[in-house]
Image (tube, helix red, strand yellow):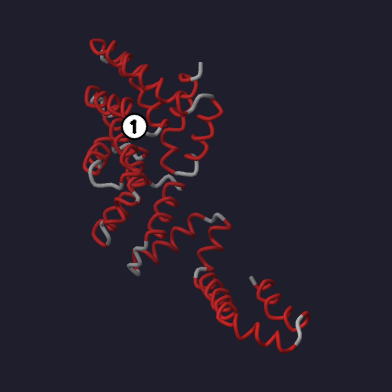
Amino acid sequence: MLLFLGIVILLPPLVLESTFSLTFFRINWPYIVFLVVLIGCFNAFYIYNRRLYTLLEKEDWPVLVRYLENEVIKKGRYSSGKVRLLANSYLVLSDSAAVMSLENKTAVARPALVDANVMIFGAARILGRDISGAVRFFGIRKGTVKAEYRDWVSWYHGFALLLNLQNEEAGVEFSLLARESADPVITGLSSYFLSEILARRIRGKGPEYRETADLGKERALKVLSEAKNWNHQCSRLSSEIHAAAISKYLEETGKWLYK
């Protein structure tokens, strides 16, 4: 930006006659002022957040957590980015209890941020072995989260039900997703759980679950026809912390789909 600003200011006097140069500046001065303000704002934003960026660059998670706890919890600055970053940092340190404590404080200060970070807060319950809590958490939020998270929340609700040995309820969730989800990864995961886990746990529903799983498998393969397509979609998920809870199942589903 500085280089571009320098070219805009210095080039006209060098290549244009003085009359044309003055005309150029008279016409374009708003753009030059805009660039100066933009550069100033960019640097001010960095300077204001330099402590945060330094800790992120060093990956010093314990110190980063203390810094964010002071900013978010003590000072009450419950911004979306800082709440999300603090929750992710807790999970990096395997401190699921701290994530749930943060969720409770966020629900009081800014309730909308709980739904905005539903995958992180819900995954923390699963990773922290609070399975019944995860069932309640995802079950309540299936109808309240944004449309972009709805299928994932439903899938995690089914996954939590499965871990809680509520097999038939899990079967209902996975069957619906296998038939109707627009996300091929969710469709594939749901179909895998129906075919390879629930069909064996509930013998009487085995044929029904396998039939639904075959339908879901066909739907997933229409979108992700090759294993490399599946792996690409899963690699995009790897940047999401909640995917750590199911990385093994993503791999197993890929083998099941493309065997």
Q: In which quarter of the view is residue 53 placed?
A: bottom right
Task: Using the image, determine if residue 95 lies above or below residue 60.
Answer: above
Q: Is mark 1 on a helix, strand or loop?
A: loop
Q: In which quarter of the view is residue 217 placed?
A: top left
Task: List the residue tagged with mark 1.
Answer: 181
**x and y percentages locating residue 25 in the rendered image:** 64, 84
- Disc 1 marks a residue whose amino acid type is Ser
Task: Using the image, determine if residue 37 lies above or below residue 52.
Answer: below
- Rendered-image quadrant of the N terminus: bottom right
Q: Residue at x 36, y 41 (%)?
A: 123
**Circle count:** 1
Q: Which residue is drawn at 65% across and 75% down?
A: 5
Task: Using the image, determine if residue 42 lies above or below residue 107.
Answer: below
Task: Using the image, determine if residue 218 lies above or below residue 206.
Answer: below
Mark 1 Cα-neighbour bin, 10 Å: few <14, some 14–19, many ≥20: many
Q: Residue at x 31, y 56 (%)?
A: 113
